[in-house]
Image: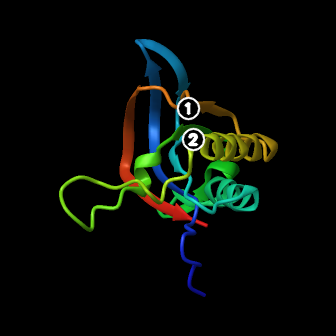
Amino acid sequence: MPMAIGSSPVRALLQRVSEATVRVDGEVVGEIGPGLCALVGVGVGDDAAAADRLAAKMWQLRVFPDAGGNMNRSASELGLAVLVVSQFTLYADTSRGRRPSFVHAAAPEQASALVERVVEALRGAGAEVATGRFGAMMQLSLVNEGPVTVMVET
């Protein structure tokens, strides 16, 4: 079913990591060991139900290796941590010109509430969650294992 004009799926760029750290002004504000680094973008038209679906999908996504080396295990099964960092640039439209447009990204008030909703849904499911700081200029350092990077949309 096509999306309505003006709506977009809440999305996350997930990276399987052995460690990840986010800093603001040189101070560590979020840090995990093995787990998932989730760059979360909220689009115009997203809602709490979409945020909840995204959190469940991320937590259950099988991107970690089993004993045979196949991606058959989830962060949930393994009890791994998740670092959630807000990332409005996931909604960059580069179809015209050389400067991205962000008209499909949600307004900061809506985005902040829905990123926090994702965090709370993950915690409610049993995840240990660290976060960045919404709206801040952040420096993200991570070691991508695999490398494994997956775009997840609701």
Image quarter where the C terminus lies is bottom right
- The structure residue drawn at horizontal position 76% and vertical position 47%, both measured from the top left corner, is 121
Choose the circle earlier in sequence order: 2 or 1.
2
Rendering coords of residue 51 (x, y %)? 68, 55
Query: In the picture shown, does residue 24 fall above or below 95?
Result: above
Image quarter where the N terminus lies is bottom right
- The structure residue drawn at horizontal position 66% and vertical position 53%, both measured from the top left corner, is 59
Mark 2, secondary structure of its residue: helix
Rendering coords of residue 19 (x, y %)? 46, 32
- Seen from the viewer's position, the closer of residues 64 and 16 is 16
Residue 137, visible in the rendered structure: yes
Tag 2–tag 1 contact (CB < 8 Å): yes
Of circles 2 and 1, the one toward us is 2
Q: Residue furthest left?
A: 98
Q: How many marks?
A: 2
Q: Is residue 23 left or right of residue 50?
A: left
Rendering coords of residue 123 (x, y %)? 76, 40
Figure quadrant of residue 24 = top left
- Residue located beneath label 2 in the image: 108
